[in-house]
C-alpha cells in the first residue's frame, strides 16, 4: 500500500510508487526518488560505561537510543554529531574527537511512513566534569550503562542495536 494517493504536482491518481523508492505520475511525468537519508549516532564512552538516552517521542518512545540525528544539507557527519550533542544534551565536543566506527542501514518508521536511513556511528569520549542539560521534548532521561550490563533488546532501533552489539564484541575480543 502506498502512502502517496495523489501526484503532488498535478493531483492525478494515475501514479506508481515502486518499492517505496521511485514515484512516477503517468499523467504529468513527474518522477521522485525517495533516497536514503543520512543520520548519525554517537557511542559516548565514560570509563566502562556508555551514555544512552531514553526517547521521549515516537518512533520508539521510551526505548534506549544513542545521541544523534539526521544530517542537514551541506553538513558533514562529524558536524551532525557535534550539532546533535549540543541540541540534545548541551554538550560541546570538538569535531576531531569523533571517531568513525561503522555504518548500518535502518528503517525509520515515522507517522506511518517508512524512511530508509544510513546510520553512521561514531565513538567519542565523554569530557571530564561535563554537565548535561536534556532537550526534554526529545529525551526523557539519560542512562550511563556499564558495557557488561547493556540489554540489547532495550535499544529501540535495529541499526543501533547491531552497532552496540558489535562495539561490545570489539571491546571484549
Image: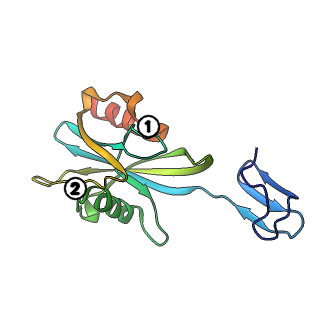
Image check: 163 left or right of 99?
Answer: right
User: What separation in Å lies between label 1 and label 2 (alpha carbons)?
Assistant: 22 Å
Whole-percent x, y for residue 133 in the image: 22, 55
For discs 1 and 2, the disc positioned in front in the rendered view: 2
Q: Residue at x 31, y 52 (%)?
A: 136
Q: Residue furthest left?
A: 129
Q: Secondary structure at mark 1?
A: loop
Residue tagged by mark 1? Answer: 156
Q: Residue at x 28, y 34 (%)?
A: 171
Whole-percent x, y for residue 20 in the image: 71, 50
Quarter occupied by the C terminus: top left
Picture mark count: 2
Q: Residue at x 54, y 51 (%)?
A: 117
Image check: 118 left or right of 24?
Answer: left
Residue 138 versus residue 30 in the image, above or below? above
Residue tagged by mark 2? Answer: 133
Whole-percent x, y for residue 138 in the image: 37, 52
Image check: 26 left or right of 144?
Answer: right
Q: Secondary structure at mark 2?
A: loop
Question: Which comes sooner in the sequence, label 1 or label 2?
Answer: 2
In which image quadrant can residue 147 be found? top left
Which numbered marker is on residue 72?
A: none
Local crowd at mark 1 within 10 Å, few (<14), some, or many (≥20)? some
Amino acid at each position: 500500500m502506498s502512502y502517496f494517493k495523489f501526484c503532488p504536482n498535478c493531483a492525478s491518481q494515475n501514479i506508481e510508487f515502486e518499492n517505496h523508492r521511485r514515484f512516477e505520475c503517468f499523467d504529468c511525468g513527474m518522477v521522485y526518488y525517495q533516497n536514503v537519508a543520512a543520520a548519525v549516532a554517537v557511542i559516548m564512552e565514560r570509563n566502562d560505561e556508555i551514555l544512552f538516552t531514553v526517547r521521549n517521542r515516537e518512533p520508539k518512545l521510551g526505548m534506549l537510543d544513542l545521541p544523534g540525528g539526521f544530517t542537514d544539507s551541506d553538513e558533514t557527519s562529524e558536524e551532525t554529531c557535534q550539532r546533535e550533542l549540543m541540541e540534545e544534551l548541551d554538550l560541546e565536543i570538538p569535531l576531531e574527537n569523533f571517531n568513525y566506527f561503522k555504518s548500518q542501514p535502518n528503517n525509520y518508521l515515522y507517522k506511518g511512513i517508512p524512511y530508509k536511513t544510513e546510520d553512521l556511528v561514531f565513538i567519542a569520549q565523554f569530557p571530564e566534569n561535563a554537565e548535561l542539560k536534556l532537550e526534554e521534548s526529545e529525551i526523557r532521561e539519560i542512562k550511563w550503562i556499564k558495557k557488561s550490563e547493556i540489554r540489547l533488546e532495550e535499544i529501540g532501533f535495529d541499526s543501533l542495536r547491531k552497532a552496540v552489539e558489535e562495539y561490545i564484541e570489539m571491546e571484549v575480543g
